[in-house]
Amino acid sequence: MILGLVQGPAELLPISSSAHLAMLPRLLGWDPDELDPELRKSFEVALHGGAALALMITRRGEIRTELAGFDLRRASVLALSFLPAAAFGYAFERVIESRFGGPRGTAAGLILGAVAMALADRAPQIRGKGDADWKDGLALGIAQAAALIPGVSRNGATLTAARLRRFSRDQANQLSRTVALPVILGAVGLKGARLAKRGISRRQARWLAIGTATSFASTMAATDLIRMVERDRALAPYSAYRILFALLILLNCRR
């Protein structure tokens, strides 16, 4: 329930929800290593799935508008934003998690992502709605693939890519949300298939259900945070928070 409550706000802000899900148990004195790594990762994906479902409901008008105007240009943006992350995740997710998923790797991802966000936020905002093309889709896809590195943040990476491509703040946020859903739903489907194949206990299924439901509820309650990010302000506050969180991890998490 605690992690589900954290997931909603952390998913809507560019502060790396995955880093919070992975490091908060350590900071709170829990022992996440007692869980099967595959089950722990599946739990994180289930929380992302709950958040994605909430976003599909709260942003349904925006989704309908996008679908109504769906054409070859939009299809190319969506496909190229999905394929790099899907291929890279399918091939290397477990390797990345085992090598970079510890406190130091996560803290490094938070700091590097914070620096990239701060630099990208200085780019001119000259592109708006309807300007995205296949090159932008590819840039967003590479960003989502890079976000598989713990601490980088999918939201932060796609916002960085969109702003480097000179999109306005509100359009960068819309692009970030639009390209996120297919990747999150794909990850949920892959993890769900793996769990169905290996099987889980009734107790573990209850964990997944509680976490998913709480994540859904917290995302629904925190959806107004999207407007906060979309206001005409810099990403500096989120960059500063990420660096502070990284330092907290380094100071308190030894393993």
Image (cartoon, rainbow, N blue to C red):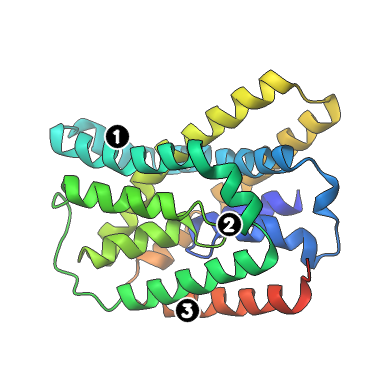
Residue at the location (65% across, 45% down)? 44
Residue 47 screen position, x and y as percent: 63, 43
- Residue 251 placement, left or right of 94: right
Crowd around label 1: few <14 · some 14–19 · many ≥20 (10 Å): few
- The kind of residue on which mark 2 rests is Ser
What secondary structure is found at the residue carrying circle 2?
Answer: helix
Residue 185 versus residue 198: which sits nearer the camera?
Answer: 198
Amino acid type at mark 3: Pro
Q: Are marks 2 and 3 in contact (CB under 8 Å)?
A: no
Instruction: Give the residue drawn at x 68%, y 61%.
Output: 102
Q: Earlier in the sequence, mark 3 or mark 1?
A: 1
Residue labelled with disc 1: 64
Label drawn at residue 17: 2
Density class for disc 3 (Cα within 10 Å; few <14, some 14-19, many ≥20) is: few
Residue 165: percent from left, percent from top:
21, 63
Q: Which mark is residue 237?
A: 3
Q: Secondary structure at mark 1?
A: helix
First along the sequence among labels 1 and 2: 2
The mark lying in front, picked from 2 and 3, is 2
Q: Is residue 188 visible?
A: yes
